Image (tube, rainbow, N blue to C red):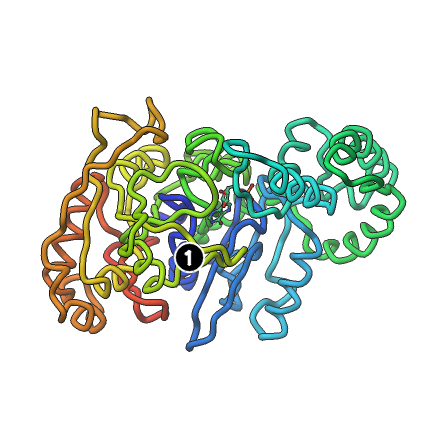
Amino acid sequence: MSTLIVVGAQWGDEGKGKVVDAVAAQADVVARYAGGNNAGHTLVVDGRKIVTHLVPSGCLYPDTRCVLGAGMVIDPDVLAKEVASLQALGLLMRDELRVSLHAHVIFGFHRDLDGLREDLAQGPRAIGTTRRGIGPAYEAKAARRGIQIRDLFDPPTLRARLEHNRDALTPELTRLGREDAISVDTLMAAAEPWARFFEPMICDASALCHGAIRDGKRVLFEGAQGALLDLDHGTYPYVTSSNTTAGGVCTGLGVGPTAIDAVWGISKAYATRVGAGPFPSRLDDAVGQRLREVGGEYGATTGRPRDCGWLDLVALRYAARLSGMTGLCITKLDVLAELGRAEVCVGYEDGVDPGRDGLANARPVVEVVEGFDDPGLAGALAQARTFEAMPRAARVYLDRVAESVDVPIALVSIGAERDQTIFVQRPFE
Ligand code: IMP
């Protein structure tokens, strides 16, 4: 096995960054396939916190090639800043990063639209986006007026595309209160240094991944966001504008499904969500608040407090199906142990089915998990470095999750530091 997809199995923020970082130590290539800087991956190395939004979490290893795929939307200023700050930490050598010529560019007017729409949206129309311009950039792509990285190197095409966008978007921007938001000349001037910045990094990401797989290299495909934010299969319309599930790898990187060996889905030992939309197992009480505090549940990208709730086994089973998961990674088990109480959602009233009925009317049926009220649990868990060494309550909990979702446990994370990661399966053979 030489290829592995790592995807979020909830609403994002599952701790993918940490898992990818752990697996990337054994990978030759780490490639992102969807989303943009709406993502925020928090990594803790030797007590130092590093947050990346665009650069794959594999960037911490000197010999790992990092790739941004065609399915992504990239804000050049954000990427340039991120690359500079990683390099200042001695972490990302310029030659490590490659960017697909087919990825789409986020411009200021995409961000303006995203923010203005959110400001003015009322009731069910408000999505609670990250305001990073993600939705408008994907809209432009689907409308076939999007601007790809390759267009930055072709000024006449770039100008024509920008004019097309100006004509298409000015009426809405004006209605929302922004006149003259799109000056083609200003944007052409801004794009010049972007072309210089991208020049050494551009690539055919599909060919790069194929070449690596053909040469027997280990390729890790890094998901962003989570299954329930998938544009087609998530809690629509409260989703992001890309395919976050494993299928997104094939379209976003130009890699066929036959090249995929394994899929690991990441889930917290509980559940969180930011932005609007259904969350059946949400806790609107003091327990939910305590989960937020103990787990530090504030957005890595926007700083927004995350809603917290119990692990939803029905939604997790659905997510496992969507991505064909072969392994489950459970993160933040230490938080649940410290909380001193654990419950899981084992079903919805009236047999609501996430795929058929959606989650808007799902009322959870929860069960208490035994053993989490033991005051010694958190301390005992913190000592464990193998699955077998974990306290019994933790093992019983993990077995229950695996059995219910019908996917074996691949990895368990019991803290933010690298050595607090317990591998149960090997990521690559
Ligand atoms: P957008 O992706 O900024 O358009 O936001 C759409 C929805 O996805 C909002 O509810 C966001 O809060 C959510 N979202 C987008 N990216 C992430 C992420 O990386 N983690 C968690 N939620 C996200």
Q: In the rendered image, which residue does mark 1 sit on?
A: 20
Q: Residue 116: horizontal and vertical position, in percent?
A: 67, 41
Residue drawn 84% across and 34% down?
163
The reply to whether residue 20 is in sight is yes
Residue drawn 10% across and 54% down?
370
Q: Residue 64: horizontal and vertical position, in percent?
A: 51, 61
Pointer 1: residues within 10 angstroms few (<14), some, or many (20+)?
many
Residue drawn 73% across and 47% down?
108
Is 388 placed above or below 128 here?
Answer: below
Give the left or right position of residue 186, taking residue 11 as reference.
right
Give the left or right position of residue 35, taking residue 409 as reference.
right
Q: Residue 62: horizontal and vertical position, in percent?
A: 53, 68
- Secondary element under disc 1, as helix, strand or loop, is helix
Nearer to me, 76 or 110: 110
Residue 413 picture quarter:
bottom left
Q: Residue 338: horizontal and vertical position, in percent?
A: 23, 66
Is 90 placed above or below 426 here?
Answer: below
Q: Does the beta carbon at disc 1 come under 8 Å from ligand 1?
A: no
Give the left or right position of residue 68, taking residue 231 as reference.
right
Amino acid type at circle 1 is Val
Is 162 placed above or below 142 here?
Answer: below
Which residue ends up furthest to the top in the rendered image? 356
Nearer to me, 87 or 292: 292
